[in-house]
Amino acid sequence: MWKTINDVLANIDNLVWGVPLMVLILSGGILLTLRLGLLQIRKLPLALKWMIKNEEGGEGEISSFSALCTALSATIGTGNIVGVATAVGTGGPGALFWMIVAAFFGMATKFSEGLLAVKYRIVGEDGHSLGGPFYYIEQGMGKKWKWLAKLFAFFGVCVGLFGIGTFSQVNGISSAVHGFFDPNNKHCVNIMFLGKYSWSVVIASLILAFCVAAVLIGGIKRIASVSQVIVPFMAIIYFLFAAILIITNITQVPAAIKIIVKAAFTPKAVTGGAVGSMFVAMQKGVARGIFSNEAGLGSAPIAAAAAQTKEPVRQGLVSMTGTFIDTIVICTLTGLSIILTGAWKVEGLEGVAVTTYAFQKGLPFPAEVSAFILMLCLVFFAFTTILGWDYYSERCLEYLSGGNMKHVTIYRWLYIFAVFIGPYMTVSAVWTIADIFNGLMAIPNMIAIFALNGVIVKEAKDFFQRHKNGEFN
């Protein structure tokens, strides 16, 4: 019976995350790139400058940088380490090329999401902000589309509680800790109704649940304050060690880039036909790129709506840097590390084991040190993803319940409980369901992006004209 259910869910998942959704998201990014005149290239230096320079006097709950870190906390996660390895392993080195292409167009989409989030948000007298796809659908497209806004919010709640924010991330953390401290299960305990588990898993789950509860109970301001410390710190640590790996093997970089480009268009010339066709490389790269940076899914604008800013376009530019950092920088470093060291060709390795092999082989440190660094990055990346997705799903529930904060409080405790039991949840159907809801979020959001692309272009032109005239710095 379970096999039948899993097969049905797997088919639905493949359908949701299939070609139509990727074409929808990618075509939206291409349209916006053309209409905005390659804004992601022209305005990237300005976006990076404003990323760390907070605006004064804007409405909202948290600074623009904090909003970006909250969004990055949800996107910089296991996908940057495990997802890239999976994409390269199944689609070949060419998948990295298509991942970067998807991220390039995704920057225009992320800019538009951040812009619309601030333009159509609601800010209460107490400074409490609520915004995102549900509000720019309802207010931008009109009240008759409120059903579409509610559909997005429903999918958002389901994604948070059913796995992307809880079970899959917690499992990633406990697996990483277990793999490093007790890989041979030498120290185990029998847990009633659950079975035999390593003490490393049990201790990790208890510490994690406590830390998550301590942060989430403080709301968005505490989530943001924690994220703006952990996210930049761990991203810099990961960047430095991946950069050391690449610099150590710098003579092989030109050959690796040649392999990536060649495999993107003629995979069989590189893989010998072992990893499918150009379509597979493109599909895996685009899908993993979208999954990693979430451009088009509609999650990041929920955090952007809380930013203290008066200018929607300014926040759009700051939001855009999230995709640049997440995929074009971090995922590219991971992919290059895997290809440089040949980790993608090693038989029997999957997921995090591929990246671990690359770090152990490529870094000029003892294997244990390299494995520990990667484990630490995985743990903190996954931890911040848990925090980010709680905020997203709480705001979705707040919209669905008409602002009833009692429902939100109950949900928060359910979320903490899901984190606590996460390491012991091994039903693959849970992750598949979460994956399906994650993909379904994108459909209402992209409909709104297409419908409001004229508003996006008008706002951008007006803003940059005022900026050119020197109305503000």
Image (cartoon, rainbow, N blue to C red):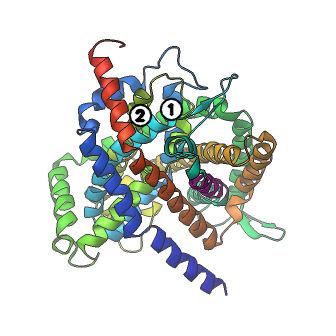
Q: Residue at x 43, y 23 (%)?
A: 52
Which residue is at the front of the view, 219 or 174? 219
Image height check: is 128 above or below 349? above
Highlighted range, magenta: 147-161
Looking at the figure, which quarter contains the N terminus? bottom right
Instruction: Identify the amino acid type marked 2.
Output: Gly
Say which element carries label 2: helix
Instruction: Identify the amino acid type marked 1.
Output: Val
Looking at the figure, which quarter contains the C terminus? top left
Which residue is at the front of the view, 202 or 234? 234
Q: CA distance from mark 1 to mark 2?
A: 8 Å
Q: Is residue 402 left or right of residue 320?
A: right
Q: Residue at x 43, y 51 (%)?
A: 296
Residue 73, given in percent of the width and then of the height, sits at 53, 41
Q: Residue at x 71, y 64 (%)?
A: 424
Which residue is at the front of the view, 186 or 150? 150
Query: Would you say the residues marked 1 and 2 are in contact, meaning their CB atoms lie under 8 Å apart?
Result: yes
Residue that carries the numbered disc 1 in the rendered image: 118
Residue that carries the numbered disc 2 in the rendered image: 316
